[in-house]
Image: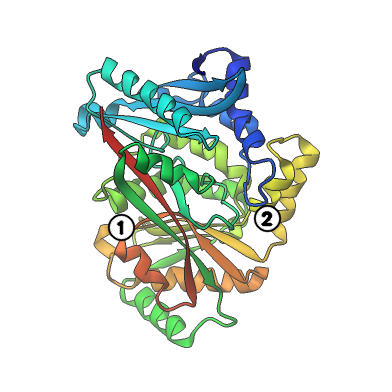
Amino acid sequence: MITIKEATSKEDLTTFVKFPFKLYKDSPYYVPSIIKEELDVMNPEKNPVFRNSEATYYLAYKNNKIVGRIAAIINWIEVKEQKKPKVRFGWFDVIDDIEVTKALLKKVAAYGKKYSLEYMEGPVGFSNMDKAGILIKGFTELNTMITWYNYPYYQEHMEKLGLEDAATWVEYKIKVPKKTREKVVKFARLIKERYQLKLLKFNKSKEILAYVDDMFDLLNKTYSSLQTFVPIQQYQIEMYKKKYLPYLNPDYITCITDNTGKLIAFSIVMPSFSKALKKMNGKVYPLKFLHILKAQRRNDTAAFYLIGVDPEYQNKGVTALIFKEMNETFLRNGIEMVETNPELEENKAIQALWNDYEHEQHKMRRTYRKSI
């Protein structure tokens, strides 16, 4: 018999967060999240997203043994301002028992119906900046810091239960050229001079803070036309500053301004933390965090997280300037391979950026939806 319990106490939420550690304990590809960070994300007193969102967390038990988890989420900006009558589901993990998945999704549907919503969609988080999608290709690859890992049967469960494809994301591995291509160097110089652009590089993480708000403003402008877009709120930006600043290596951040000092493009790349996070196994006390510090300084793999370009400068070759700087940063730091973050399959403009490089589309993930 399957029993669904709402996780309300601190003990319940800790059980919720730790369930994947048990489910994937034998997987060499699962990269765990930091337990404290996950708990903070679910805490309305610590996560400002709850100013415009709400969530309920469910645990599934079978024969008194935990067998699954799911979060039911409503983003009220999406529902009220964007007129999308959607209940989100996320933090979905389950054993290979379709009846457990069915029972968990039934709870999400009931949660959405309570607010007269019309369909459910997931797995996603609270906003665009959270993890999203069930992995449907790339099961023998480590997940990154900003993606979920799952077993292949997740997709089968969704499809058998009548959920339809909602959005598909692709991810790439890109081989770093041994030398920055001469045509990229020349084109970057031409673009820089033509538009009187200035390149900004940083020595300390704190120097980046002055540009973070402008970066998120560019993100909102860059991705506003995509189907999953929900505007990023200022209070979320403040949280992301605190959450991700410790992970940034300033040498990997590139900003470009126009001749008035206005930010018109940026890229955020980080050394890959997948192996470091796997060693940390969800813990973050000082000795464990040394794995992150080591990964920041000595690594042969990087993760390409974000790129933003002002619409006024899109299709004007500004990305050549970004790629030139990135390639030189990679060569300077011994980076041989770069992994992209998930990109919507429909976002052909971003995917076209990799055409001039040796690359492989090695992962794919998907969200699913169903009327309730």
67 or 364: nearer the viewer: 67
Q: Nearer the viewer, residue 18 or 318?
A: 18
Q: Which residue is mark 1?
A: 310
Question: Disc 1 residue type?
Answer: Asp
3, above or below 269, in the image = above
- In this rendering, would 350 be left or right of 300? left
Measuring from the top left, give residue 274's x and y in whole percent: 63, 52
Residue drawn where x is 49% and y is 45% of the image: 153
Residue at the limit of the structure toward the right, as seen here: 287
Q: In the picture, which quadrant includes the C terminus?
A: top left
Q: Position of residue 188 (x, y in %)?
A: 41, 77
Residue density around tag 2, few if under 14, some if 14–19, many if 20 or more, within 10 Å: many
Residue lying farthest to the top in this orientation: 9
Looking at the image, is 27 positioned above or below residue 7? below
Q: Is residue 174 left or right of residue 195?
A: right
Question: Residue 124 falls in which quadrant of the image?
Answer: top left
What's the residue at 42%, 62% (across, down)?
256
- Helix, strand or loop under label 1: loop
**What residue does disc 2 label?**
296
Work out whether 301 lies above or below 32.
below
In the drawing, does residue 6 fall left or right of residue 372? right
